[in-house]
Amino acid sequence: MMNQLDVLIKEIIDNIDKKELKKYIDFEKYKEYILKYVKKVDYKFIEESYDVMIFETIYINILLVMIEEIIKSKFNISIKHNVILKKIDESNIFSKYRLKSIYVKRVKELVLNKRKINLNFFTDFYEKSINKQHKKILGQFYTPVIIVNEMIKNVRINN
């Protein structure tokens, strides 16, 4: 059974014009960025990871809209999601894209209607949004939250 978040994610991803989105994410700049960190990589990998970055751009925008709304509702501080994105996107690859205003509004409504938003909410959001092929291309592996919590409990800080 799909919840509101699942439905919204599917709708946004299904309705994104990927050709339009690619106008905002410069492939050559992205390729330079990848080659800066990975010396031996074939062109096919760069193309596949670029397509994944299209999704990541959408995800980052949705996530930052959520964060904007949480900050506003919990702390009464207004900071726009695109301002946050520009600050964290040092390479300036992803911050040119803007999520359509209708989706910004719907994401904000979802956050406002949600009683409790915690780490699991964001983890579930990402996990449901990205498929296994994308994770493989990005070399991503996700440690279950229960294991992360146990690891944190067992960390010893030496002064």
Image: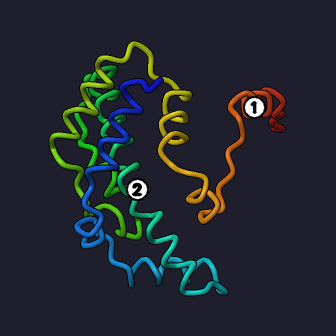
Q: Secondary structure at mark 2?
A: helix
* Residue at the (22%, 67%) spot, across then down: 20
Residue toward you, 84 or 94: 94
Compared with 76, 138 (above or below) is below
Question: Eyeballing the image, is 132 above or below 68?
Answer: below
Side of 144 relative to 16 (left or right): right
Q: Which residue is mark 1?
A: 152
Residue 103 lies, in percent from the top left, at 22, 40
Q: Amino acid at mark 2?
A: Ile
Outermost residue toward the left? Answer: 101
Q: Nearer the viewer, residue 59 or 84?
A: 59
In what quadrant of the picture does the C terminus appear?
top right
| Residue 119, picture quadrant | top right
Question: Mark 2 Cα within 10 Å, few/some/many (few <14, many 20+)?
Answer: few
Depicted 37 relative to depicted 144: above or below: below
Q: Is label 1 in a helix, a strand or a loop?
A: helix
Name the quadrant containing residue 106: top left
Give the residue displayed 39% in from the left and 41% down from the top: 63
Residue at numbered disc 2? 88
Could you say where residue 3 lies in the image, as x and y percent from the top left?
A: 41, 24
The percent coordinates of residue 92 (x first, y second) are 35, 68
Residue 16 tag number: none
Q: Is residue 71 left or right of residue 33?
A: left
Seen from the viewer's position, the closer of residues 157 and 155 is 155
Occupied quadrant, residue 30: bottom left
Residue most toward the front? 1
Q: How was this image coloured?
A: rainbow
